[in-house]
Image: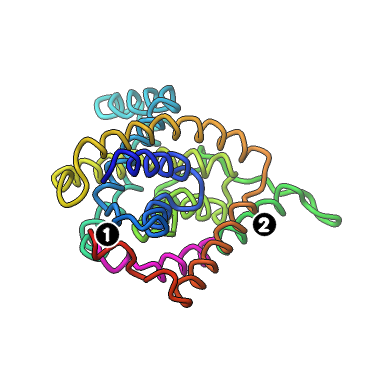
Amino acid sequence: MSWFESFILGLVQGLTEFLPISSSAHLRLTAAFAGWHDPGAAFTAITQIGTEAAVLIYFRKDIVRIVSAWFRSLIDRSMRSDHDAQMGWLVIVGSIPIGVLGVTFKDQIEGPFRDLRLIATTLIVMGIVLGIADRLAARDEAGGRHRASKERKTLKELGVKDGLIFGFCQAMALVPGVSRSGATISGGLLMGYTREAAARYSFLLAIPAVLASGVFELKDAGQGHVSWGPTIFATLIAFGVGYAVIAWFMKFISSKSFMPFVIYRVLLGVLLFALVAAGVLSPHAGESAG
């Protein structure tokens, strides 16, 4: 991998990680369209450490408060009813599904799941799901001619059951094209949470999963066509760009609809199917060269 490739892929990772459009799919597609080698699951997982570092800094006050309360609750029983302490446990509980499924389906994640036809399918299907969830949330918030607006849930109402559902939604993102934020936000909206609550928990929930995945994949970095230098460079680029994107996205969702992302996902999926069907792109473009 050249330094130019690593710069572009790091930029793509930073731009797409927090948006509900799938960073892993865009890394895969960028390589396929450019005629480069597929960067692979290891490169994707390690560069995600950069974007998660952006989450750690952006949500640093929340994270310090949650971690502190969680540790204190281990020795002080009165702290176990504290919301921040409970959030610590809920992040742990919600991380279980992706941990178990990630190890179980590791070979599929690094192989068949990277087929461009599967990515096109998940882009379209999850785009439609996000659109439905977004419309339901908008209907609740706006009310209607003959009904009052419906109050949606906040993170203070999050329990173990919903935490696990969020976790299974996040685990769906093991398939490129699904989108970690897209799946968890969609799940949250369908369960009745506000956009802000669903996005905030989505980002907090991703921290242990992404960091663990990145550390786990470190052993495969520097193998094949991807060397350590470009990987680290791409991770740094992803961090800087990712921080700017998360700051923008948290402001965007407070008042805007997800429909632009829905339309983008569906159009990209249809385009990808058309290019594969026309023979312009192979479903495994770049893989054999890797």
Viewer-proximal residue, 215 or 151?
215
Where is residue 205? Give x, y as percent: 38, 42
- Vertical arrangement, residue 141 with respect to residue 113, above or below: above
Residue at the (39%, 48%) spot, across then down: 160
Q: Is residue 9 left or right of residue 135?
A: left
Secondary structure under tag 2 reads helix
Residue at the (54%, 54%) spot, across then down: 191
Q: Is residue 97 visible?
A: no
Look at the image and give the residue range highlighted in magenta.
Answer: 110-127
Residue at the (46%, 48%) spot, across then down: 181
| Number of the label disc, if any, that sits on residue 101 | 1
Rounded to the nearest angstrom, the CA distance separating label 2 from label 1 is 30 Å
Q: Residues within 10 Å of mark 1 (few under 14, many from 20)?
A: some
Q: Is residue 261 left or right of residue 49?
A: right
The three-letter code of the residue at mark 2 reads Arg
Q: Report the residue marked by disc 2.
A: 135
Q: Is residue 57 visible?
A: yes
The three-letter code of the residue at mark 1 reads Leu
Where is residue 37? Give x, y as percent: 29, 56
Secondary structure under tag 1 reads helix
Q: Quadrant of residue 52?
A: top left
Tag count = 2
